[in-house]
Image: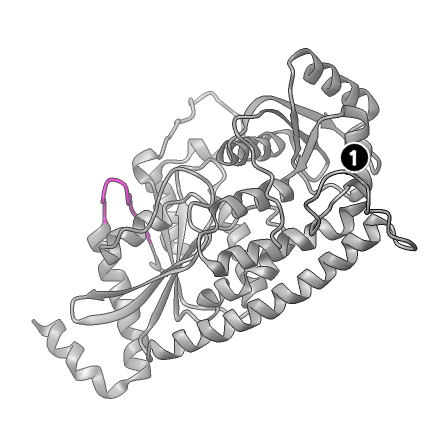
Amino acid sequence: MKIEVTEIYEERAVLVGLITPEQNEDKAKEYLDELAFLADTAGASPEKLFFQRLDYPNPKTYVGSGKLDEIKAFIIDNEIGLVIFDDELSPSQLRNIERELNVKILDRTNLILDIFAKRAQTANAKTQVELAQYQYLLPRLTRMWTHLERQQGGIIGMRGPGETQIETDRRIITRKISLLKEELKSIDKQMATQRKNRGKMVRVALVGYTNVGKSTLMNLLSKSEVFAENKLFATLDTTVRKVIIHNLPFLLSDTVGFIRKLPHHLVESFKSTLDEVREADLLLHVVDISHPNFEEQLEVVTQTLKEIDPQEKPTILVFNKIDAFSYVPKDEDDLSPVKRENISLEELKKTWMAKMHDNCIFISAKEKQNIEELKELVYEKVKEIHVERYPYNDFLFQNYDEE
């Protein structure tokens, strides 16, 4: 039995977000722009963004009744069939909003799960996504009439004595979650065996926010053809390649991209995939330097990595997309606070090089700028780890470096 995936094919949608004391207008706008990108990745067409300023989300309907009426009027006038909310909605909020708007309602978590289900290719990724979907679905059964194992139509023969359909479905899903967890344990053992069979080569993992160019960089460093496109979560499964720089071989892995408000179900169910991060000796943290709020994206990844593995690892910050970097110098008479777009690339380089003690580099994977310099930096860091692990091999590098 497989859970049904909510397919979205060019459905016209409206997006809803909040402006709160913790999330100002600029940040709320950026979050909804990202939600629009998620919707586009899933196949929906965002038609309008709705914002409301509240101290906290309305516990019944997320937004206030007046804003809900405004949204309802717009979807009726424009024949909208889908409304997507920027935060995870509680079961009661979902139920109340659906009752008021009478259209399909998704929250950010459900949308991300849908994209993951659409992108999953291997049995491992599909199992992990399916587990996350069931964990999301279980507390929300009261708003659904699901027949997860019965395909016949009508209601004749469906009236079981002493048990409602919701109770039946809850029991089915609970059992399915247990089975999927056991299946993932088996997959984890297989993957652990594969990792052991790779020997003791130094492991390097590419990490970063989604859509920062990790897969493009993977292709450049490993001369492979990992799938890469300008969509969120283009890569779900971890890809591992053997890379040789000069005379030094190491393993390079490309991992799933992170995102703000990443559903907890996904972090939990993708632990086996994220083992590549835990077992890495060196992290290449790829950052989109052209993004207006790259610092926040960097912090999201850093915090998520701490949740996955609290141990600090040697890290190289790889600032990608310098070809797309934009800079707007301030006028001399402009006394407003300096914003990110007012800081030049050279100023950012000096700041981050000083902060990271030269463990960072600025590149363009698309235009292949500074790729050779990146390879040299990776080589030096991998060599340090290799020599520390195998000190008797030190003379090999001395001979090479003298050449």
Query: In the image, 175: left or right of 403?
Result: right
Residue 365 shows in the view: yes
**Residue ID at (92%, 55%):** 162
What kind of colouring is applied to the model shown? Answer: one colour
Residue 296 shows in the view: no
Outermost residue on the top side: it is 77
* Residue 226, x across and y down, in percent: 32, 51
Query: In the image, 40: left or right of 372?
Result: right
* Residue 63, x across and y down, in percent: 77, 29
**Residue ID at (26%, 61%):** 377
Q: What is the quadrant of the N terminus in the image?
A: bottom right
Q: Is residue 332 above or below residue 107?
A: above
Q: Is residue 65 above or below residue 320?
A: above
Q: Quadrant of residue 49?
A: top right
Q: Find disc 1 in the rendering and name its residue.
A: 55
Asked if residue 363 lies in the magenta stretch, the reply is yes
Amino acid type shown at disc 1:
Asp
Q: Quadrant of residue 92?
A: top right
Outermost residue on the right side: it is 162
Magenta stretch: give its range. Answer: 361-370
Q: Along the line of sight, which residue is nearer the eye, 89 or 188?
A: 188
Q: Along the line of sight, which residue is nearer the eye, 45 or 86?
A: 45
**Residue ID at (54%, 60%):** 270
Q: Is residue 168 above or below residue 59?
A: below
Q: Residues within 10 Å of mark 1 (few under 14, many from 20)?
A: few
Asked if residue 170 lies in the magenta stretch, the reply is no
**Residue ID at (63%, 32%):** 28
Q: Along the line of sight, which residue is nearer the eye, 313 or 193?
A: 193
Q: Secondary structure at mark 1?
A: loop
* Residue 40, x across and y down, in percent: 50, 31
